Image: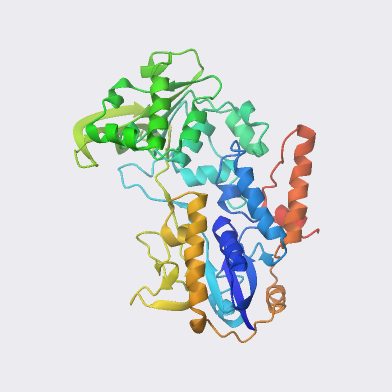
Amino acid sequence: MTKLRLAIVGAGPAGIYAADILLKLERSFDVSIDLFEHLPAPYGLVRYGVAPDHPRIKGVINALRGVLDRGDIRLFGNVRFGEDVTLDDLKRHYNAVIFATGAVRDASLDIQGIDADGSHGAADFVSWFDGHPDVPRTWELNAESVGVLGNGNVALDVSRILAKHAEDLLPTEVPQNVYEALESSPVTDVHVFGRRGPAQVKFTPLELRELGELRDVDMVVYDEDFDYDEASRAAIESNKQVKVIDRVLQSWRQRPGANNAGGEASRRLHLHFWANPVELKTDQEGRLTSLVYERTSPDGHGGIEGTGELREVPMGQFYRAVGYFGSPLDGVPFDSRHGVIPNHEGQVLSEDSNAIMPGMYATGWIKRGPVGLIGHTKSDAMETVQHLVNDQGSWWQPEAPEEEAIPELLASRGVKWTDLGGWHRLDEHEVGLGEPQGRDRVKVVPRDEMVRISRGE
């Protein structure tokens, strides 16, 4: 029987789902799958891209854990593609590779002053408060007024973490250094800006509703933003999700703090719609002092247009949550404009001729860009895997497909890789750290400590 030796680069949801789908397919060949992950622990953005006060994500982790714990997929963590393992290595040892490396960088924002001291990408901030091992452990939170640009769930996560009282995060797996920084934050006002109106936001209703439940935080919305045009009214009437979002926002309009009327809470979270950022102003030392934005309005065709009216909001920090962006991989075609691997339904295409490159596939955000939820990731992986199966005649013919070749290769290069048993050790260690404090876990943050615990050293 034909044997498929498959490498998957990236052990987040996209990579794990692709492996699971392939193993469950009716097929005429045997499958052997190795997952390569540059972090010492699996699960990708589920572990390092979701706010610690989102316990529902545990359900996703449990599903992913179930796939890995079946024992029919090997995990090689702490292995950097392009350094520890190259594309040539994969061609020598496998029939094909699926790249599932996601998108972890911030998309750029081209406005004057975007590089000001105090201006940050949301992805960097999320990595910090999630205890990502490859980012600095300090984050200066020194502003009373903070701005967040974006009307998606990442913007909500960032805004909520900034506005929430630190002690309310203590039951979660928030790292200790993050708790201490948030506890000493002087923030009183968080301003969230969106270019379009309330009926065009990308928030999911549950996340938006949770925002309004923060203790000692007034929700500030402005009546001027709710003068709906015909397209907005139609969206509310025709889309259940938009209708729920509108209902939540309308309820906030009835609260004492609406229109910045001065509620009783010590902190305020302002939602500014129809606001297009124009400039970040700075002082003589280059420190951020305010955001200038232009009021927008519907253009009658589903888009927006500027009104010419400029407004200014004082702030000492600004976070852009305008999307994630993929990173290029050594030897792999890359579309630098869209931040993805060029592909046709997951089949990797060459940069110059758009020809299908045999043996190379992509799935998840590195395939389609940073859009969609977990459900999209599953259907996305199915499309890629189906092409992989159908392309059997064009798979690579590896020189050394033996499974023991990979551990030998990594050992010869001095790579301290972690495996599934190592992840179980780290997982148990983190849960043990949390138990005395009544917490689910306390994340181990330094990479070398994660590796040492995982390897039992």
Position of residue 134 measured from the top left corner of the image (x, y, whole percent): 59, 53
Name the residue: 74% across, 52% down.
Answer: 426
Residue 155 occupies which quadrant of the picture? top left
Answer whether residue 69 is visible to the viewer in this image: yes
Name the residue: 31% across, 21% down.
Answer: 223
Position of residue 374 measured from the top left corner of the image (x, y, whole percent): 52, 50
* Left/right of residue 194 with respect to residue 330 in the rendered view: left
Residue 308 occupies which quadrant of the picture? top left
Answer whether residue 131 is visible to the viewer in this image: no
Residue 229 occupies which quadrant of the picture? top left
| Structure colour scheme | rainbow
Position of residue 355 measured from the top left corner of the image (x, y, whole percent): 37, 77
* Left/right of residue 405 with respect to residue 346 in the rendered view: right
Report the front residue among 321 and 29: 29
Report the front residue among 212 and 185: 212
- Residue 21 in the image: above or below residue 114: below
Position of residue 333 measured from the top left corner of the image (x, y, whole percent): 42, 71
- Quadrant that contains the N terminus: bottom right
- Residue 455 in the image: above or below residue 177: below
- Quadrant that contains the C terminus: bottom right
* Left/right of residue 350 with respect to residue 388 in the rendered view: left
Report the front residue among 180 and 437: 437
- Residue 316 in the image: above or below residue 443: above
Name the residue: 33% across, 37% down.
Answer: 238
